Image (spheres, rainbow, N blue to C red):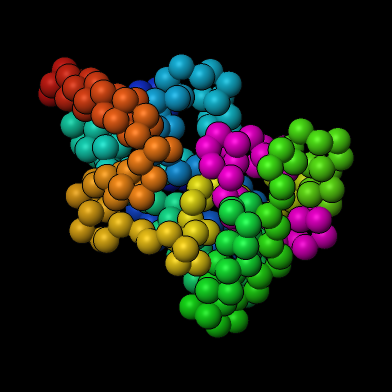
Amino acid sequence: MTASAAQTIELEGVRLHALDEGRCVAAVVAALARGRGGWIVTANLDHLRRLARDAALRASYARADLVVADGMPLVWAARLQRTPLPARVAGSDLIWSLSRAAADSGRSVYLLGGDPGTADAAAAELRVRFPGLRVAGTCCPEPGFERRAGEIEALAARIGAARPDIVFVALGSPKQEALIERLRGRVPNAWWMGVGISFSFVAGAVPRAPAWARSAGLEWLHRLAQEPRRLARRYLVDGLPFAALLLTRSAWRGLRSS
């Protein structure tokens, strides 16, 4: 399975690859074996909402090599419109499975971003979990680094010298996607993926929702309870109405196609 050969569907004008986690990892491993890098985007409900009104971000996502559904509402919507996806593929799961695959194949990972100290803590945990994993480096730039002269160039040189095979970028969306677009050409043989808060999950600094909540599409409720001030607007004011609209539109498309 190659990234280019993966079946795709369209949801609200956004291309999504119909892959489960295992096939996504296999596509990355196969590409690395051929000396080819790429970019994985794990699209969630909030991303889809912003893509609907941000043409530049939509164009950026269209340039990614793999776009998978990181959110049960997207999986439900795809099913309703009769173009089903095999499973949710979360970035917070892929950081584990890609690191396992890297350890098994002698590849290296690089951890960029996150809260201070979490990249190093996550790297240490990944080494414990996957003996033999090579961590090419970690870096936690100071806030506003992307606006300071020379910072991007210095960061690109640092990552280029480390020559990682997979780069996890934990800066939140859309900042992490914008940075990946600026850096990936400097290390074209690596695979890049934005992972949001995942370093904190891996390091154990922030507990992740239990598996039953994730499979039921309730991980957002767990996150809201952890950070109500920061996430209330995203989930309650913006997210829930958009989810209702998305599912309604998808059901209507499904009825029209039957």
Q: Residue at x 57, y 50 (%)?
A: 170
Residue 210 in picture, x, y percent from top left = 27, 61
- Evaluate whether residue 105 shows in this view: no
- Evaluate whether residue 67 shows in this view: yes
Q: Residue at x 18, y 31 (%)?
A: 80
Residue 144 in picture, x, y percent from top left = 71, 38
Vertical side of 103 occupied by 89: above or below: above
Residue 79 in picture, x, y percent from top left = 21, 36
Residue farthest along the right direction in this orientation = 150
Report which quarter residue 120 is drawn in.
bottom right
Q: Residue at x 45, y 25 (%)?
A: 50
Q: Residue at x 55, y 47 (%)?
A: 194
User: Left or right: where does residue 93 sit relative to residue 55?
Assistant: left
Report which quarter residue 247 is drawn in.
top left
Quarter in which the C terminus is drawn:
top left
The residue segment tinted magenta is 158-183
Q: Is residue 60 magenta?
A: no
